[in-house]
Image (tube, rainbow, N blue to C red):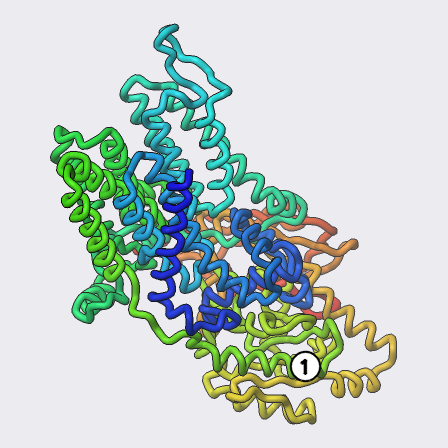
């Protein structure tokens, strides 16, 4: 017992030393976020949201004037959110909690790895080597640049242990009783209940890790079936059922919401299974941040010239790469050289991972046949990494057992372990950078937001310009020099202000924001004031002219000098003076009518469903391509019927006579034309509720390299209210 405690203590100390050396932890201010851009800011929103609101489904501080919610965006991350809540007991500062979460991930990955290595009777040296290399994999450093939940992969070793149990164990729930000569059921099996608990945890640590675990369980079960151990296939199916149940429990609130309100989920393109597939070259090439300039340059050259670069986070490092090649070589050429049964099972899993996830592999076939929405198959690389390191540990253990006899040989062996670990860590970890590289910008932004917050009443809504998408499909939220999710920085530094950015793309609040932001400056200001906004935030980086034209216009309209950030990037106007002036110019009835007209469009939504691709746009048009038939969902969220005008351009390929049929409970029409464009407009009376409108065409499929089935397109669609403003 004491030896086990000392072993884990040595692991934690080693992990802390390595982490300190690779990040210069002793010089780091933990109150400054490690990541302060792109996906790191997006992740920060989740951390602060959990701290502010207790959980992540709703956040009343963003997405104004509607409430931000994540019901359209299912997340299977309950374990990660529980870790955030645990860390929030120690600090209410989102930056501190985020940084602690990142650091904790290294320790958790090392601990679970060591547990699994020791479970398979790997001795101290190889077990420590494999555990530390797995905790400090390139995947970990790269994912910590923004995908913080993917970087928290500490359940992978435990999931692998369960998968290997399914391959060979006879003492799970179902097993073969040799004394009775038949399959028996053992509800008292400790391993069965341990595996069940592990599968429940895996079901709440990310949809990708849950899905890949289920895939490997299928492989283990089928392999056992081939050896006439069908009971292990049943064990695998039971564990898959446990994981599936856990996933459904995670997304139950999403399903309940969508059953009542409909869904607004961005549909992934089938081609993304190829774009984000696995590349063997990425597994074997050095990391792009490698300490050797020559190796880093080689990888950079490949990344710059090779097609389909995916996410490029799959590097195994030299030790992991050797393990990967050994497993491939063994199953293909040297199966007669049986090192252990576990090596055989790891080889099967390794090859299965490659066949599934590689670009053009079985995952692509599955996606194109079923439109399966899993896309980032390169993320299976962290499973491959653990398989490879476990194989290396087994080989080193066999070396120790067969060749190590004298104390001198033992010393040489453990020195060798230290040298291999040192080489592996140098290969896998980056050169330590400057700690708190974002400190100046972070503190400037914090000071600016706090200056705004002090001057405004609690709960004031702030509209943010320019408009940009939030949680988009194929369209990012990057606008000119303003990168993705930059608008979230205002929220990250505030405590009681409410911000416009954060409305789910396609939802009514997002469509309203997009339409309002496109209005002329004077009309735009009136609209947001009628909607109840008390402040206006402008990011100059979002404009080609650095915001000069619009800032000048707004200064004239608002008749006040704005507050500017120290670096002059952000501009803010308090709208109180303008609001009072506007209110005094109208009667009470006129003010109420204007307010009602502004809010009316937010009670409507147009959701493009089955058959339609994600929205695309250029400088002048926006459109959805469609299969031979597709469905538009029109949702009237108000309590009364309303008269609206639906208008659009419908485009079919070619110039032959074609027809487009529209069918629903509120609209039935057939359009025929000798040309390929239909200018369509229809006045509708829409009762409260959600209405399904079917579009179908007799047009021929467009001949194009695009992998989608394209028969027609709906351009520049608009839903206009007969009394009041419309929304797109």
Q: Is residue 649 visible?
A: no
Left/right placement of residue 682 relative to residue 438 reads: right
Q: Residue at point 60% right, 71% down?
A: 491
Q: Residue 546: image x %, image y %?
A: 48, 87
Which residue does the image show at 29% across and 69% down from the upper left? 431
Query: In the rendered view, would you say 657 is above or below 598?
Result: above
List x then y, in percent, for residue 581. Answer: 79, 87
Q: Which residue is mark 1?
A: 525
Q: Is residue 277 above or below residue 478?
A: above
Viewer-proximal residue, 635 or 488? 488
The secondary element bearing badge 1 is classed as helix
**Is residue 419 visible in the rendered structure shown here?**
yes
The one nearer the camera, 39 or 443, is 443
Q: Quadrant of residue 537?
A: bottom right
Q: State the image coordinates of residue 51 (x, y, percent, origin top left).
A: 62, 60
Horizontal arrangement in the rendering, residue 225 relative to residue 680 (left or right): left
Which part of the image, by quadrant, shows the N terminus?
A: top left
Quadrant in which the C terminus is drawn: bottom right
| Image side of residue 652 versus residue 282, left or right | right
Residue appearing at x 81%, y 72% in the figure: 593
Q: In the rendered view, would you say 676 is above or below 336?
A: below
How far from the left and from the top, in percent, is residue 348? 25, 34
Q: Is 226 on the left or on the right of 584, as rendered?
A: left
């Amino acid at each position: 017992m004491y030896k086990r405690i000392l072993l884990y203590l040595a692991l934690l100390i080693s992990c802390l030393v390595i982490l300190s050396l690779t990040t210069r932890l002793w010089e780091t201010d933990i109150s400054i976020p490690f990541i302060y851009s792109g996906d790191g800011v997006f992740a920060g929103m989740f951390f602060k949201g959990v701290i502010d609101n207790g959980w992540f489904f709703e956040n009343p501080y963003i997405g104004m004037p509607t409430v931000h919610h994540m019901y359209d965006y299912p997340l299977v991350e309950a374990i990660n959110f529980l870790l955030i809540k645990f860390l929030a007991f120690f600090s209410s500062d989102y930056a501190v909690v985020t940084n602690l979460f990142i650091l904790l991930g290294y320790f958790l990955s090392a601990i679970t790895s060591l547990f699994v290595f020791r479970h398979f009777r790997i001795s101290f040296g190889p077990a420590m080597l494999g555990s530390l290399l797995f905790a400090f994999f390139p995947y970990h450093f790269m994912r910590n640049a923004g995908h913080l939940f993917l970087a928290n992969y500490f359940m992978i070793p435990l999931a692998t242990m369960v998968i290997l149990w399914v391959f060979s164990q006879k003492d799970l729930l179902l097993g073969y009783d040799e004394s009775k000569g038949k399959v028996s059921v053992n509800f008292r099996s400790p391993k069965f209940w341990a595996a069940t608990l592990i599968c429940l945890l895996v079901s709440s640590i990310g949809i990708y890790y849950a899905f890949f675990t289920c895939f490997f369980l299928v492989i283990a079960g089928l392999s056992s079936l081939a050896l006439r151990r069908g009971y292990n296939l049943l064990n695998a199916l039971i564990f898959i059922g446990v994981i599936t149940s856990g996933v459904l429990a995670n997304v139950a609130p999403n399903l309940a919401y969508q059953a009542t309100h409909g869904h607004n989920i961005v549909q992934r393109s089938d081609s993304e299974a190829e774009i984000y597939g696995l590349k063997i070259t990425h597994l074997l090439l050095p990391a792009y941040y490698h300490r050797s300039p020559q190796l880093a340059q080689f990888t950079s050259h490949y990344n710059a010239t090779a097609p389909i670069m995916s996410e490029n986070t799959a590097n195994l490092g030299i030790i992991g790469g050797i393990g990967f090649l050994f497993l491939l070589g063994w199953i293909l050429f040297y199966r007669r050289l049986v090192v252990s049964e576990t090596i055989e099972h790891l080889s099967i899993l390794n090859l299965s991972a490659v066949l599934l996830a590689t670009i053009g592999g079985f995952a692509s076939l599955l996606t194109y046949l079923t439109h399966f929405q899993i896309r980032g198959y390169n993320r299976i690389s962290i499973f491959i990494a653990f398989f490879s390191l476990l194989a290396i540990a087994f080989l080193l253990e066999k070396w120790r057992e067969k060749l190590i006899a004298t104390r001198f040989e033992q010393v040489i062996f453990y020195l060798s372990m230290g040298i291999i670990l040192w080489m592996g860590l140098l290969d896998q970890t980056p050169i330590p950078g400057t700690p708190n590289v974002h400190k100046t910008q972070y503190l400037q932004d914090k000071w600016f937001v706090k200056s705004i917050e002090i001057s405004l009443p609690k709960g004031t809504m702030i509209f943010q310009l320019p408009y940009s998408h939030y949680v988009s499909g194929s369209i990012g939220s990057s606008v000119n020099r303003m990168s993705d999710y930059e608008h979230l920085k205002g929220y990250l530094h505030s405590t009681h202000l409410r911000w416009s950015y954060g409305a789910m793309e396609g939802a009514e609040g997002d469509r309203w924001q997009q339409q309002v932001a496109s209005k002329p400056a004077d009309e735009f200001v009136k609209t947001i004031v009628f909607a109840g906004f008390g402040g206006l935030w402008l990011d100059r980086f979002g404009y080609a002219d650095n915001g000069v034209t619009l800032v000048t216009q707004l200064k004239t309209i608002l008749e006040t000098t704005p507050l500017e950030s120290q670096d002059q990037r952000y501009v803010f106007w308090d709208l109180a003076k303008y609001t009072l002036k506007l209110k005094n110019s109208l009667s009470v009835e006129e003010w109420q009518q204007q307010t009602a007209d502004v809010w009316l469009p937010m009670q409507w939504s147009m959701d493009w469903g089955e058959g339609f691709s994600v929205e695309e746009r250029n400088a002048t048009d926006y459109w959805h391509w469609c299969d031979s038939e597709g469905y538009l969902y029109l949702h009237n969220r108000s309590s009364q019927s309303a008269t609206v005008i639906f208008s659009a351009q419908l485009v079919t390929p070619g110039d032959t006579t074609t027809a487009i049929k529209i069918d629903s409970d509120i609209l039935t029409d057939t359009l025929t034309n000798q040309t390929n464009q239909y200018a369509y407009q229809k006045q509708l009376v829409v009762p409260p509720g959600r209405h399904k409108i079917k579009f179908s065409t007799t047009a021929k499929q467009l001949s194009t390299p695009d992998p989608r089935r394209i028969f027609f397109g709906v351009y520049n669609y608009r839903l206009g209210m007969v009394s009041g403003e419309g929304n797109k």
